[in-house]
Image: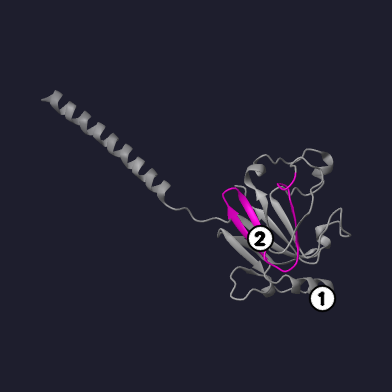
Amino acid sequence: MRGHSLKLYQGMFRLDIIKKFFTVKVIDSQVLQEPRDRSHWCMVAYWEEKTRVGRLYSVQEPSLDIFYDLPQGNGFCLRQLNSDNKSQLVQKVRSKIGYGIQLTREVNGVWVYNRSSYPIFIKSATLDNPNSRVLLVHKVFPGFSIKAFDYEKSYSLQRPNDHEFMQQPWTGFTVQISFVKGWGQCYTRQFISSCPCWLEVIFNNQ
């Protein structure tokens, strides 16, 4: 009788372990199946010359329209931002942004579509050789698009060890976009901070 009770106790103990095991598995399965809180995949900052205008815009949806004047448009409306810049050039370029651009996140990267009536200019670490000391500024005409950020290429990006590079901000996971006006070696403006109206797209690489 005592041996029977011991076997019964052992059986109940094993059953309890099994129950706990399967309970944990079920809970883990439920956790994996539950949708996580959506996090942003990038942040967008709008600049006028050296001054950022407005707050950082967090992007969670797969695509985002960034515009100044877009009938029935949803997205990041630059017209609604309060700017104290009285520069005639800034105001002129601002008025030319029009339908602006569309950022679209796809499996292989992020595309930028120029919806405005004027060229845009883009600088990205994945548009050129990642080891290049000088990144080129790419001109995108109205109605055209470009893969501004390549996820596969970004995996190989590493912060440079060169002392000269370490004195500068590392922008490997950002894309800079200027409306209407270009900058760099081929232009009178050497730095994007000299451009009237421009965007900084900061990717979440987590």
- Range of residues picked out in magenta: 101-128
Q: Which image quadrant for residue 18? A: top left
| Horizontal and vertical percent position of residue 13 | 25, 32
Q: Is residue 77 above or below residue 200?
A: below
Q: Which image quadrant for residue 48? A: bottom right
* Quadrant placement of the N terminus: top left
Side of 21 where 71 appears, left or right: right
Residue 116 vs residue 34, the one in the foreground: 116
Amino acid type for the residue under numbered disc 2: Tyr
The figure's colour scheme reads one colour
Q: Is residue 44 magenta?
A: no
Q: Is residue 124 magenta?
A: yes
Residue displayed at 84% across by 62% down: 194
Q: Secondary structure at mark 2?
A: strand
Furthest residue to the top? Answer: 3
Q: Are marks 2 and 1 in contact (CB under 8 Å)?
A: no
Residue 25 vs residue 130, the one in the foreground: 130
Residue displayed at 51% across by 56% down: 38
| Horizontal and vertical percent position of residue 95 | 75, 74
Q: Which image quadrant for residue 145? A: bottom right
Q: Secondary structure at mark 1?
A: loop
| Horizontal and vertical percent position of residue 97 | 72, 70
CA gap between label 2 and label 1 equals 29 Å
Provide the major secondary structure of the magenta segment: strand
Amino acid type for the residue under numbered disc 1: Lys
Query: Residue under circle 2?
Result: 113
Query: Residue under circle 1?
Result: 86
Residue displayed at 58% across by 60% down: 63
| Horizontal and vertical percent position of residue 93 | 78, 71
Side of 68 where 191 appears, left or right: right
